[in-house]
Amino acid sequence: MRVDVVTIFPEYLAPLDLSLIGKAREDGLLDVRVHDLRDFTHDRHRTVDDTPYGGGAGMVMKPQPWAEALDHVLAQDNPSGAKPRLIVPGPGGQPFTQALARELAQEPWLAFACGRYEGIDERVYDHAREDLGLEVSVVSLGDYVLNGGEVAVLAMVEAVGRLVPGVIGNAESLVEESHEDGLLEYPIYTKPSSWNGREVPPVLLSGNHGAIADWRHAQRLARTAARRPDLLHASHGTDGSD
Ligand SMILES: CC(C)N1CCN(Cc2ccc(Cn3ccc4ccc(-c5n[nH]c(N)c5C#N)cc43)cc2)CC1
């Protein structure tokens, strides 16, 4: 999978050089390219924003740098003229969920546009859809306000990247994790079996794999009912009260 990120803070994406995503880049499973939006400006101050038409607080990101940046992304190493799916993080976007992460993990090429200030001139979205022929999705990390799209892109690239085959060495760990099948994950333990006067649940030491699986499923149901009854209703046809 190729991933392009356009931002005025390229250093914000440095964590994508680390850990599993960084290893996947080294292994050629992910091709992540970060582009500085200011490289597509032409004035001395490398201006990317201006005041909003109609008045209002804050600044709006100018359309021209974005159009030139998107042209560069589409042209770079792309002899076939393929097109990426464009993801624009925004507080008013569709929720970023595990289901959407799974959907995006099927895409061969994703491009992320990290806005700042009050956001990006609306004509950039129209240009991307109508002139560049891109599928554009505005996606929100959650119901809280960030200062820009970079944090969201870090989360999205990690959530999507880990679903790309080969990125997570043990594919088993992708099963039975929170939100993968509608239930939260079960409690986990490791050595020592007795620590600080606290014991590991004996069933986990029993070697009885059926009993262990039953205990873990019961724990997932209880934990989901306690913390996220909404998930129980959505995926298990109950109202979360039982
Ligand atoms: C003036 C007045 C009428 N405005 C009315 C609407 N307000 C909404 C507003 C608020 C903050 C920002 C800052 N910002 C810039 C680009 C950008 C990208 C993502 C996010 C973001 N925030 N929260 C998430 N879950 C996000 C995601 N994904 C925030 C971003 C942009 C937009 C802004 C103020």
Image (tube, rainbow, N blue to C red):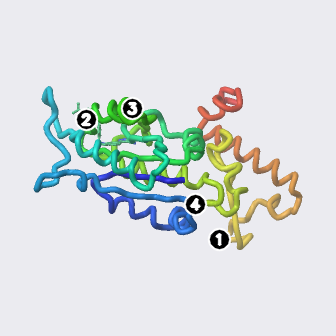
Do residues under tags 1 and 3 come within 8 Å of each other at their CB atoms? no
Residue 51 image point, x, y percent: 13, 37
- Name the residue: 21% across, 40% down: 62
- Secondary structure at badge 3 equals helix
Circle 2 is placed at which residue position? 121
Residue 137 visible in this rendered orientation of the protein: no
- The local crowd at label 3, few if under 14, some if 14 to 19, many if 20 or more residues have their Cα within 10 Å, is some
Q: Earlier in the sequence, mark 1 or mark 3?
A: 3
- The local crowd at label 2, few if under 14, some if 14 to 19, many if 20 or more residues have their Cα within 10 Å, is some
Marks 1 and 3, how far apart at CA: 59 Å
Q: Earlier in the sequence, mark 4 or mark 2?
A: 4
User: Is 113 or 152 nearer to us in this picture?
Assistant: 113
- Which quadrant of the render holds ligand 1? top left
- Name the residue: 73% across, 56% down: 172
User: Is 215 or 52 nearer to us in this picture?
Assistant: 52
Determine whether the beta carbon of the residue marked 3 sits less than 8 angstroms from the nearest atom of ligand 1: no
Instruction: Inspect the image, locate mark 1, and give the three-letter code of the amino acid beneath it.
Output: Asn
Circle 4 is placed at which residue position? 29
- The local crowd at label 4, few if under 14, some if 14 to 19, many if 20 or more residues have their Cα within 10 Å, is some
Q: Earlier in the sequence, mark 1 or mark 4?
A: 4
Specify the quadrant of the image occupied by residue 76.
bottom left
- Name the residue: 58% across, 47% down: 105
Do residues under tags 4 and 2 come within 8 Å of each other at their CB atoms? no
Circle 3 is placed at which residue position? 129
Q: Is residue 125 above or below residue 19?
A: above
Do residues under tags 1 and 4 come within 8 Å of each other at their CB atoms? no
Residue furthest bottom as drawn: 192
Circle 1 is placed at which residue position? 196
Marks 3 and 4, how far apart at CA: 28 Å
Left or right: residue 158 versus residue 34 is: right
